[in-house]
Image: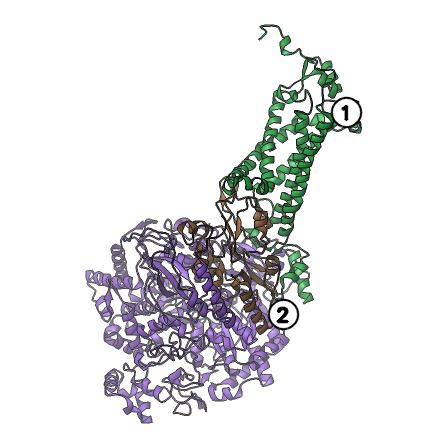
Chain colours: A green, B brown, C purple
Amino acid sequence: MRALLLALALLLAAPVAGQAQTAPQISGTPTSPTPMLPPVADELEVLKALQGGRLEGRITIPDQQAASLIQPQGRSWRDFHNVTLAWVGGIAVLGMLALLTVFRISKGRIPVEGGLAGRTIQRFNGLERANHWMVASTFIVLALSGLNLTFGRHVLLPIVGPEAFTAISQWGKYAHNFLAFPFTLGIVVMLLLWVKDNIPNGRDIKWFASGGGLVGNEHPDSERFNGGQKGIFWITTLGGATVAVTGYMLVFPFMFTDIAGMQLSHIIHSIVSVLMIAVMLAHIYIGSIGMEGASDAMTTGQVDLNWAKQHHNLWVEKELAKGRGAEPPASARAAGAD
Amino acid sequence: MARMKFLLDAERCIECNACVTACKNEHEVPWGINRRRVVTINDGKPGERSISMACMHCTDAPCAAVCPVSCFYTTADAIVLHDKDLCIGCGYCFYACPFGAPQYPRVGNFGSRGKMDKCTYCAGGPQADNTQAEYIQYGANRIAEGKLPLCAEMCSTKALLAGDGQVIAQIYRERVQRRGYGSGAWGWRTAYRETVAI
Amino acid sequence: MLIKRSEARAGKQRLAAAYQGLSSGGLDRRAFLKQAGLTGVGLSALGAIPLTTVRPAQAGPMNHQQPVARVKNICTHCSVGCTVTAEVQNGVWVGQEPSWESPINRGTHCAKGAAVRELVHGDRRLKYPMKLVNGQWQRMGWDQAIGEIADRMMAIRQSSGPDSLFWLGSAKFSNEGAYLYRKFAAFWGTNTVDHQARICHSTTVAGVANTWGYGAQTNSYNDIRNSKTMIIMGGNPAEAHPVSLQHVLSGKEMNRANLIVIDPRFTRTAAHATEYVRIRPGTDIPIIWGMLWHIFQNGWEDKEFIRQRVFGMDEVRAEVAKWTPQEVERVTGVPGAQLRKVAELFATQKPATLIWCMGATQKTVGTANVRAYSILLLATGNVGAEGTGANIFRGHCNVQGASDFGLDVATLPAYYGIDETAWRHWSRVWGVSFESMRARFDTPQMMHTPGIPTTRYFDAILLPKDQIQQRDNIKGMLVFGHGGNTVTRMPEAQKGLEKLDLLVVADPHPTTFAVLANRRENTYLLPICTQFECDGSRTSSNRSVQWCSKIVNPIFESRTDYRVMFDLAKALDGAAQRRNMPIRFAEEMFRPYEIANGEPTAESILREINRGAWGSGYSGISPERLKLHQQHQDKFDLVTLRAKDDAPAEIRGDFYGLPWPCWGTPEMRHPGSHILYNTNIPVKDGGGSFRPRFGLERNGTTLLAEGSWSKDSEIRDGYPEFTVAVLKRLGWFDELTAAEKASIAEVGTGLGGEDRVSWMTDLSGGIIRVAVNHGCSPFGNGKARAVAWNLPDPVPVHREPIYTPRTDLIAQYPTLPDRRGFRLPHLGQSVQARSNEVARDFPIVLTSGRLVEYEGGGEETRSNKWLAELQQDMFVEINPRDAVARNIRDGQWVWVTGPESNSRTRVKALVTERVGQGVAFMPFHFAGWFQGEDQRRRYPQGTDPIVLGESVNTITTYGYDPVTFMQETKVTLCQIRAA
């Protein structure tokens, strides 16, 4: 009994176990006959011997996934999906929304100190902005369709009914699968465009130490991107890459991995995604209604000089030194210039 | 009302695959979709056992629990079925299923998943019984005709039993008592959180 | 909204009631079927299928509003004989239901049986006649095809004689088809007519017939339920006969029986054994003698049985004494202790049965193997009783019947042989003169000369004319229902096929015969329907004959065997007339039959069989009785196969399928013989004794039984076969009726006096009737022969395979010297001598066998989408150690090369411990790739099987059994390397 279990364990653990240790025999002479043990292979005992691994065997159909007979990990994945992910996602998203609400109420909109200068400085060029919005828009659709898979059943389904919900989810799935590609492209371009300005350095520590200027009224020195923005950058690129890679694992089922890999991919994909969603909520808030003058950076690409000095003083100095610094506002141009 | 289950007696299963082709035959299941399959563990060694596996129609079915669109339902006979009109082919049920039962036709771009297909316990789907619409989407509905799943009915050695859980457990129990050995009802702990006490 | 609508409530209540039967009956689910099987009603509509000449291969969901016809037929795959219940609507086979009533399969099937519906409407079938024109397949009409074929046949006959046409028949024929084909070959004037039995159990037939009388399974699948010990040696029924395992495993469970598997390969069957013995391939006789060594040593043999019913056991003792445990272990690799245990179980835990298949038979020592197995059964007294016997699992669905009806180069139907008495008998049955039959042969002598077996057809094409003992080489082949990849040495076969003047392949699928060779002309494909599309009877391995009702009309333009043979006979008449040849066929051959829809009816052919096949007891098996058995299948007992007391009077007491011998006329109502040679019951109830076929005494020792007789026999000792002379001596002659006497007298005129008329040649059945009335076996009561002096090895001796890795054993255990047989040279030692060199370069023993998903040559099953999906690649099983040594991973492509013709095959490696080190296994169902070349384009468009692959027989080698020319497929040598 014990021997059989051991044998089973060995067999299932090592794919091709028991290689040649004995001297070569005359061809055709059988290896020593194998006495039969009383055939007992209880499911539970086998699973115990496997220590929770998958129970796999041989099949003749080409679909190698079918060789997995029982995978108890399905239950763990179910727990993750239905419990862990729901809590983590719920807390992350709702928690961030709550945090932002509290912040808004306590601090209000962050103004540009000293008011708008009226003169602007080019912060992001067309390519940068276009790429940003490609990533942003796809991210939003990906996020919503992703969240729908986890929460829609409880939130949306009771409202719209099963047929409509399936239609929404089906389109959501298509959108999720297809938009993954522009999203990934955008992440790569983003990395290439901005990585040189996002190398962390000592100033970032100070920036964080002073709370990014949000705590108190001191403004820490900052180059093109401050510590917080660098954080967003790295979260976006690294998190995006992680989400992309794990996402492709899921879009191309079993092309790169087996069921365990699929489950793991899904776990990483979903956890990283909800955390990114939470971070992006903050990013969106700060970049739009949370801070005066911030949204210009990604709309017109021209930011107010005072805003820039306030948040990216070192960068402004460098830009001005390069001589292609602040431009007068459009209204200040000579009439008929265009 | 019966509580329908499958029970596989691994001491009897010889990997003849009758269950597999009976299923294909009865439901005209297309190439590449394997509602039922036979897996041999310990291949070529003492202790080799073959096990025929399909959807076990679990108690508290994991597929139903994780389905984002709630397309699963359980019949009065405790058969776990799903509505293909609601399924979006996300693959979640495959991640959760301990038995690898859900199958997906490859459709469209980059072999992505179509609507999930799985063993129906020969009980069709949500449409009216034994209509052509039901047949095309889910296959035959033998349960409505008072018959049991064809895989079990045609099992060459009567290793695969289908029917009310208590009844087939009793058949199995009697078998084990008569012959003096048995490796347990495969998948029962995982699917039904119980086993057949001998 | 997601709650299932439940009109089905009523159905479910019936289910609940049905479970009662399930639980109390344990294994018996018949109660269930009665309640469950009668409810085919439902909804929806399906357009009627238009019936045109080309019938569409359409299947579809059943229309539950229309009536459904249920038709019973028998699975066309293996020999178990599972009933197939078809549901038919509008002439379309729409569903398959479990056949609960059948005592053989009780509702169940294997993968193949559960997929047979697809065989009929499979769209890869051959749809219309075709021929090769300049290497391209061209569609043609039936009349033209048959006409051209007939003309070419006659041309061959005119230039080379009748023996230059090879009549290759099929184990897929119905009994009636097989019989008709044999009769056709006889009317053509040749004995070169053969079928698959040559390559599966010809050595079994020769071996057991030479031991105790008949070449057939002695007991039945069902009777295995009575066994206490079962040895399966050289067989893998879990894959080859899956439904038989239902009985084997039930028996094992109910009796807590020993199930011992002796095989070089740890098979799916071995997985269920209580004891598995791994042997070196080709060492069966040392194993049996090694067991007998222990049995004799310990006095476990059945001394009383041997004394009463066995001749010559002492000579066996002398041979067995050489096989000490040490020598057995040296030769076979099996340790003495294990073999002692097996021997003790087999000899002492009785009843015990020995089950074998092609692992025993497909050897150069096949007949000797079978003889040794039989002797083991005799020594332990395990023959002729319930739970005992030689349970020989035959291969194809009707290989037993096709053997019984003489698709064999050395016998006429029912094992009458080909001597003058036999020809006179069958001429009489056919209503033609013996002389006119003789005139159809090339020379009178050829009428009594065994023909050329299918294992050597290409040698008969390729060898110089002077080496073949007939007028000319083989020039043409008619191939009905036979794969071209089933015979060894395929590179030679390819050359041979290329040289033929005429090749006709009549089959539902274009078999390997059609595509293997690079032929450009004179090659015809005739679409024959499956047995599901025609009526007829078929005989399963246990000798039960089952009537098979046509399920649907032949689809596409396919036709039945009966029709094609009838049309061919007529066309031959025309061709002969045009050539001014006197020979004619149709009128004389088909006169006895009832013709309906342009073809002879199966019933009328079976009635002719009834009138002639007394020798194997097919005389009592009338179509009417068989149809009653089909109708009342549920009335037969699962274990005894006997119709129970609640059965209708006309079948009560019958054994299911009237397992032959079913003595006398149908009116005698003999129940059939479930268990052969069973002395425990009277002959009239299916009992019997061993058949004395080889004289009455040998070297002064009697060959008749001593002190043993079947129950209620009035002769309480051994006795010879019954003739008129014997009847007269016993004073029973006047129990014959006047009509019987008149018939006998008429027969006697051709045999030199009525006294010489025997039970076999008496057309009235009177002699049999009188003998059975007195409790006697018509064939006599003799001893089984432990010594068969007419065989090359009267007592089997071990002979190393032709290609053996153990070259050290060749000197001690050489194969037979070179010789001749069946009109051809037969090499032995001169080829074996090559082993000394070959074994160095080809160190791995190659053996072959079956997969459950495919059957035979595999064309039909590989074209079945439900089966083809399950095995998509040809493979070789290789032991992990051999694989590691060759750097081969599981699943990768490898070349397997053989020692003859530079043969090679490209297959996938399956690294597994199923095979021991130094042994490789390949399945034999694949074809369509040849030595790395994909031949798919050579199939007529749309008829290529879904799955193609290399054939193992591309690399199998020379080696033939001396008695039957059985090929050696189980032991040869090969080399494997990564591709």
Q: Are the residues flagged by discs 2 and 1 from a single subunit?
A: yes
Q: Residue under mark 2: which chain is it in?
A: A
Q: Relative to residue C866, is residue C725 depicted above or below?
A: below
Res C126 quadrant in image: bottom left
Q: Which residue is mark 2?
A: A38
Give percent across and percent down for residue A31: 62, 66
Q: Is residue C489 visible?
A: no
Give percent across and percent down for residue C486: 43, 62
Q: Which residue: 63% across, 28% down?
A: A189
Q: Relative to residue A305, is residue C512 depicted above or below?
A: below
Amino acid marked by disc 1: Gly
Q: Which residue: 65% across, 61% down?
A: A44
Give percent across and percent down for residue C180: 30, 68
10 Å crowding of disc 2: few (<14), some (14-19), many (20+): some
Q: Residue under mark 1: which chain is it in?
A: A
Q: Relative to residue B146, is residue C450 depicted above or below?
A: below
* Disc 1, SS: helix
10 Å crowding of disc 1: few (<14), some (14-19), many (20+): some
Viewer-side residue, C815 vs C906: C906
Of badges 2 and 1, nearer the viewer stands 1
Work out whether mark 2 precedes mark 1 in sequence or the reverse, and give the earlier one.
2
Residue B186 lies left or right of residue C869; in this view the side is: right
Q: Is residue C239 visible?
A: yes
Viewer-side residue, B45 vs C657: C657
Give percent across and percent down for residue B154: 47, 63
Residue C936 lies left or right of residue A55; in this view the side is: left
* Disc 2, SS: loop
Res B12 quadrant in image: bottom right
Q: Which residue is mark 1?
A: A213
